[in-house]
Each structure stands twice: as structure tokens, then as C-alpha cells.
Image (spheres, grey):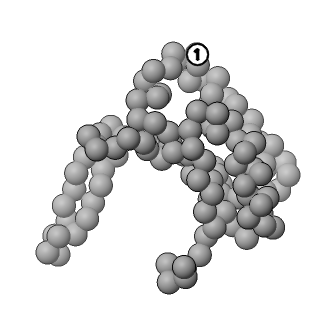
Amino acid sequence: MPYMLLIHEPVGQREARTEAEGREAYARMMQFADDLQERGLLLRAESLAGLEQSSRLRLEGGKAKVVDGPFAEAKEMVGGFFLVDCATREEALDLAARCPAAEWATVEVRGLAPCYER
């Protein structure tokens, strides 16, 4: 079953790192992705740009309302994801615990399902 491991980072965390620290964190995450790929578990992984490069859209009265980031109310942001194929939720949770980002961020584990399922 596919599971999404969403990395929720505190806002401002990236800016607080030196470039060397950021590159080291990124290298650790890419090694984690490579390990998942070798085990045949990784479907997709991506790092996402910061909030200053994002926009939010919602329809109000049939018209698109767009708000560009960064967002003052945001306390965290989705910094990236791993889409993995695991036999069980427990296996997905185990992968999340092994993810380097769990040291500095929250790793949310969510199964994929149609929006009408609960």
C-alpha cells in the first residue's frame, strides 16, 4: 500500500542553517532515498522550495483568490515528501523513524486513499 511520508519543518529552520549544514542534511536525505530505492520501497521523493516561493489558491464566489507566500500564520511548512510502497502501516512508521528529518522535523505518515474514504 502506498504511504506518504510528509516532512513538516519549522518555518525559518532552513535559514538558520549554514550552507554546509543544509548541504549535509540534504545529502543525508538523499542517502535515505537511495536506501529506500535499493530496497524497492521508494515510488517518489522530492524536496520542496520554501514558503517564499509558494502560493495558496482558493475559489471565492467562483473567482480564484491567490495569496503568495511566505504566510505570516505558518508555523511549519511541508519541506518534502517520500512516497513509499509498504506492506503495512507499521513498516511505513518504521521508515519514518529512520528518516533523518525526524531529528529536526515531524514526519507525518499517511496512507493514500480516495477522498471519500475515512
Q: Can residue 42 be seen in this view?
A: no
Q: Position of residue 79 (x, y in %)?
A: 50, 42
Q: Does residue 82 appear left or right of residue 34 in this picture?
A: left
Task: Please tell me in which quadrant of the rendered image residue 56 appears.
Answer: bottom left
Q: Can residue 41 be seen in this view?
A: yes
Q: Does residue 52 appear left or right of residue 30 in this picture?
A: left
116 versus 7 height, above or below: below
**Of 11 and 19, the residue lying toward us:** 11
For label 1, the SS is helix
Q: Where is residue 32 in the image (x, y as percent from the top left)?
A: 74, 40
**Of 10 and 24, the residue lying toward us:** 10
User: Which residue, given by chain and number where applicable, does mark 1 sit on?
Assistant: 20
Q: Does residue 116 appear left or right of residue 36 in this picture?
A: left
**What kind of residue is marked 1?**
Ala
Q: Quadrant of the image for the N terminus?
A: bottom right
Q: Does residue 56 appear left or right of residue 23 in this picture?
A: left
Task: Please tell me in which quadrant of the rendered image residue 118 appears.
Answer: bottom right
22 versus 42 height, above or below: above
Residue at image position (72%, 55%) is: 93
Residue at image position (73%, 64%) is: 89
Q: Where is residue 111 in the image (x, y as percent from the top left)?
A: 63, 67
